[in-house]
Image: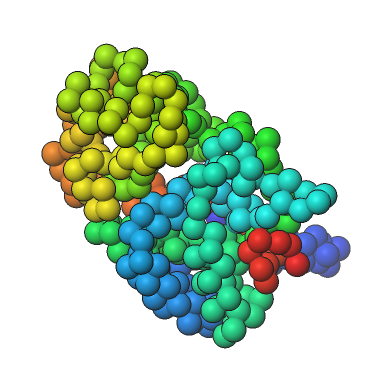
Amino acid sequence: MGCSTRTVKKSWVSLSLVASILCWSAVSAQLTPNFYNKTCPQALPIVKAAITQALSQEARMGASLLRLHFHDCFVNGCDGSILLDDTTTFRGEKSAGANANSARGFEVIDNIKTQIEKVCSGVVSCADILALATRDSVVELGGPSWNVTLGRRDSRTASLSGANTNLPGPTSSLTSLISAFQAQGLSAKDMIALSGAHTIGQSRCQFFRSRIYNESNIDKAFAASLQKNCPFNGAGDSNLAPLDSTTANGFDNNYYKNLRSQKGVFHSDQELFNGGSADAQVTTYSTDQQAFFTDFAASMVRMGNIKPLTGTQGEIRKNCRRIN
């Protein structure tokens, strides 16, 4: 139904005015790809150039930024809350179990924010910068593009408890993965598509040690290769292994091919191809990269639209690490 300010009786004027304002607010609160076209047209080119430079120095950074966006959106929506530093009176999401000593890429976002503030001070949110940086990282590594809808504002707080509760971990079952995504308004199909983000990036030994020594649904030669850098005795917790051993820094469908060969690094990865409801979709993606790219892009848009702050909610932080 369209908005209308027409009145029938004079006594309804004030009610009509309120309705008109509410209708305008609802429309203005919608995220849109051209949100900064007039207020800061330099924003998108600045983000893209910075990402190209950052990934040329370290390709792994693309996966880190993608993970950062995911971990942001799953805790109270895509509001830049994960970027906030702890203070003497505030404890944010960086120290949560899923983020402590593993969430990274903050300096890249800081650099982009500094550049944008020089040309458009107080206009572009940190949450939007993170969303754009994620898209540009995926494209830079050979993956699909999508229109990032913009207009998010930054939160003035964060949720340590939410970060500890909402983010699925490397030992999650298929059922718990589906539930975690459904809690954010995302489908099982979205979950399987977004899990393809593990076609890039690396993990520390401590998060997959149990799988490579204790699980049977893993290729024996693959497990042995990982064991060389991840001893059973607990040494080398921080040693890294690529989540996609075929093309570690290339965004493609090899992640799904690996799952069909029982070469998922995490228990949660292999759960997507383990005789369950996700098998058919994994098989499709493993044989049709374009199908994966199309679904991944669509799911990224949906994830990026999780409970954004818009209008007068939140703020536009001048520094992504702290509130104004």
Dividing the picture into quarters, in which one does residue 134 lie? bottom left
- The correct choice, above or below, for 250 with respect to 32 in the image is above
Q: Residue at x 58, y 42 (%)?
A: 100
Structure colour scheme: rainbow
Quick one: which residue is furthest to the right in this view? Answer: 11
Q: Residue at x 31, y 23 (%)?
A: 212
Q: Which quadrant: the N terminus?
A: bottom right
Q: Residue at x 73, y 56 (%)?
A: 156
> 76 and 211: which one is in front?
211
Q: Residue at x 56, y 67 (%)?
A: 110
Percent x, y for residue 126?
A: 59, 64
Visible in this render: residue 250? yes
| 85 left or right of 302 in image | right
| 65 left or right of 74 in image | left
Percent x, y for residue 206?
A: 44, 31
| 95 left or right of 143 in image | right
Percent x, y for residue 322?
A: 71, 61
Visible in this render: residue 259? no
Dividing the picture into quarters, in which one does residue 243 lie? top left
- The correct choice, above or below, for 262 with respect to 291 in the image is above
Q: Which quadrant: the C terminus?
A: bottom right
Percent x, y for residue 236?
A: 42, 34
- The correct choice, above or below, for 28 with respect to 97 in the image is below
Quick one: which residue is furthest to the left in this view? Answer: 287
> 94 and 252: which one is in front?
94
> 166 and 65: which one is in front?
65
